[in-house]
Image (tube, grey):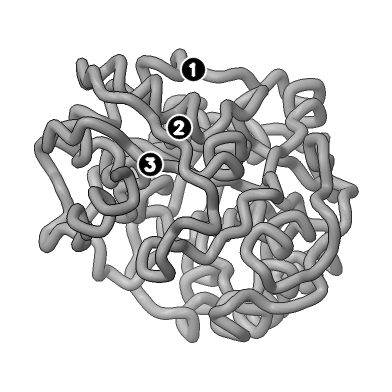
Amino acid sequence: MRVFVLGGTGFTGPHVVRRLVAAGCEVTVFHRGKTRASLPSGVTVRHGDASDLGAALAAAPRPDVFLDMIPFRRDDARARAAIVRERVGRVVALSSADVYLSYGRLFGTESGAPLRGPQREDAPLRAKLSAQGERYDKVGVEAEYAALDATIVRLPVIFGPDDAQHRFFSWQRAMRDRRPAIAMTPEHAACRISRVFVEDAAAGIAQVVLHERCIGQTYNIAEPEAPTERDWVELIARLEGWKGQVVLVETARWPESLRGPANYEHHLVLDTARIRSDVGYAETVTREHALHTTLAWQRECAPDPAPPTDYAALDALLA
């Protein structure tokens, strides 16, 4: 199978490429050349920007699959769909769990009551753009690629080594700074948000690319169940050897300076039954191993500069 990958050198991409090569695919990676990535031998690498996509496809043998790993704007997807329409066998495009209405309610762009239960692929989608506006519109991306009967992969929060967002850093830093307690609102402690380890996300993406039966389907990829945010803190505490405690503080007592944008009365949990049934998707490692690997990397590769933490305000809140 010949696979043409647009992007493929960021956080998740190299893991996907390695799995495709291991499965016997002939892989071409087309990117701007601004990111260095460790790719397997035998991968064809071509450099260029979006305007060069047509020429890059013309220079390569006709791909069986075009994998777009970096569709962020509706206009991008529309332009790419027009280019690849007659030049590839099928299309797989990466999207996000933030297309769901439950995400909009979690972060306040949509109003309404909490949507309980895991979100299946046919769950309601957001009607409004995110805070980033037209610069980021995965709902629009999905709509443009739907005309090609593309396979859409919706990803949740991804964690693992090389994560530029250092998802668990604030909790880990508090523990390594020997803070006696970590404060959470009751709503935040009980909130459930789906996550996935980067290797597992890559495995799911590769399986969808390899299975022709996935044409026209949309798939969620995530862990089979979503722990609460407090569960994550306690698992990190165990792995870090932290003996402090989680203290629940009512939301009304939190100063504005310590409040985030999320309304944790809303949850964002994905149902993954479809991808598990259709292609046999399953996790490659345990959650504990995935988190251990991530925390070990973060100890060596903390963000620089580290985001500020107002320990004085937190001490006052805990007091």
Residue 206: percent from left, percent from top: 57, 35
Q: CA distance from mark 1 to mark 3?
A: 33 Å
At a point 80% along the width and 51% down the height, the residue shown is 114
Kindly check if marks 1 and 2 are in contact, taking CB atoms under 8 A apart as contact: yes
Query: Looking at the image, is mark 1 or mark 3 nearer the viewer?
Result: 3
At a point 69% along the width and 78% down the height, the residue shown is 129
Which residue is label 3 attached to? Answer: 183
Closer to the camera in the image, 35 or 110: 110
Please rate how many residues cluster around mark 2, counting C-alpha atoms within 10 Å: few if below 14, some from 14 to 19, many from 20: many
Kindly check if marks 1 and 3 are in contact, taking CB atoms under 8 A apart as contact: no
Residue 223: percent from left, percent from top: 60, 27
Q: Quadrant of residue 280?
A: top right
Which residue is label 1 attached to? Answer: 284
Choose the circle earlier in sequence order: 1 or 3. 3
In the image, 90: left or right of 52? right
Q: Is residue 5 visible?
A: yes
In the image, 93: left or right of 4? right
Which residue is label 2 attached to? Answer: 197
Where the C terminus falls, by quadrant? top left
